[in-house]
Image (tube, rainbow, N blue to C red):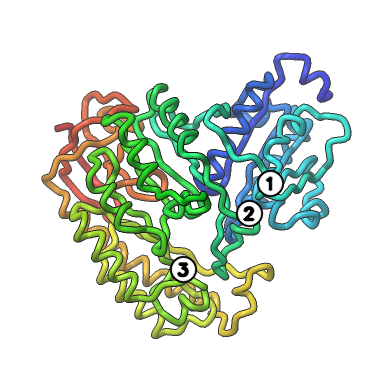
Amino acid sequence: MTLRNILSTDAKKLHLVSLGCARNLVDSEVMLGLLMRAGWRITQDPEEAGIIIINTCSFIEPAVNESIDTILELAKYKQKGVCQRLIVTGCLPERFREEIVETLPEVDIFLGTGAFDGVVAAVNGSPNFPGCLLLDPSSMKLQTQDAPRVRSSAHMAYLKIAEGCNRRCTYCIIPKLRGKQRSRPIEDIVAEARSLIATGVKELILIAQDTTNYGKDFEPAIDLSRLLERIADISPDVWVRFLYGHPNSLNDTIIKTVMTHPNVCSYFDIPVQHVSESVLKKMVRAYTPDDLFRLFDKIRSIDPDAVLRTTLIVGFPGETSKDFEQLLAFVKNIRFDHLGAFIYSDSADLPSHRLSGHVPEKMARERYDRLMSVQAKVSFENNRRHVGKTFTVIVEESVSDNLFIGRTSFQAPEVDGITYIHSEQMQTGNFARVKVIDALEYDLVGKAA
């Protein structure tokens, strides 16, 4: 079957796979919205799709490998399905550019992070459309509140409030992939929030590359706290939270705003990456260990109910045994409610590649395992404190008879644990009161209250 046949029959279907972070997911949802508006239908079965799109991630080596493996797996449908065009978008082509064209001949079209607007033309097979379109990410128009979206969840939505990043952390490729920070106008974001809530969304999650730095690129600058207040005031019955904060841009005003608005989750996601002063300097993270201790003490003093989440890197070039032991002590001291970690991922296009003292892979893995073992114990002890308490939970899924999965306000989707709920009946997508009856390392077990 030719592409022309597909376009003229009911087989005008496409399949999209979104890899990587929540920011990528929003891009995927908008691309799907644009394509549906252009007449395309979505299928979950790649075998019946005339077009297959993979929105890729390339932040670290495992993400690159996952992207390539997914491309090669879905490329098989060009032989055994009806797929006539395989399109790869996002961070993988943006990072590896023309080199990727030769590496993956199975792909028909590559679109970089600055070329999402071209997805309809690419899918429709517009004449003379290039096989690889790489535009400056900083020149791409920001998403607006009226952009069509096909959401992956009916009750929860990510709300992208800015694009790009102005920081220059030596291990991070994001500024190269996404350009400089550009914040969306506050009125446009609030309008989108109202629209999402009107469709039944019960939780809005604000995201950006550097979320707590939102509005600092405006003249005059505005603070994230203003945006939080505006969104929180739309409806008291909708949870609001933000992810991807930064120690240098999380200020007292933001903390107090979270504390004073009951529907803003007292949840502070602040990836600190490390605590050793020498490692932080090599990372070009402009804070000290004392700054971090003061920050977390301040959060807990202003908002005693605050839940803390962080992300750490182990095995960074130059990390000594002493540096790592300092990191372990920090984790034991702060007792994060949630913690993610990854092993340093090296690449020749990163400034950190040129640093001396690269940590052997085996040693880095051993450090990672030790860190996560410590955190598992901390997390379990933290979870045990919740036993006997009753919380509001958003019910997300029915997994079997009388068993549901949900999340409390201190559990963010995808990255944190979940709450198992024993109940004869619950309505997914709604809030429910749940009494915690047991605690696991990362998850909670409860029953309908």
Residue 28 x, y percent position in the rendering: 59, 37
Q: Is residue 217 above or below residue 149?
A: below
Identify which amino acid the numbered label 1 is placed on: Ser
**C-beta proximity under 8 Å, tags 1 and 2:** yes
Name the quadrant containing residue 195: top left
Residue wearing tag 3: 313
315 and 373: which one is in front?
315
Q: Earlier in the sequence, mark 1 or mark 3?
A: 1
Say which residue label 1 marks: 139
In what quadrant of the picture does the C terminus appear?
A: top left
**CA distance for labels 1 and 2:** 8 Å
> How busy is the neighbourhood of tag 3: few (under 14 within 10 Å), some, or many (20 plus)?
many
Mark 1 or 2, nearer chain start: 1
- Kindly identify the amino acid type of the residue bearing the numbered disc 3: Ile
Crowding near the residue tagged with mark 1, few <14, some 14–19, many ≥20 C-alpha atoms within 10 Å: few
- Identified at 64% across, 40% down, the residue is 141
Q: Is residue 123 above or below residue 186?
A: above
Residue 412 in the figure: left or right of residue 282? left
- The residue pinned by badge 2 equals 179
Query: In the figure, is residue 88 to the left or right of 221?
Result: right
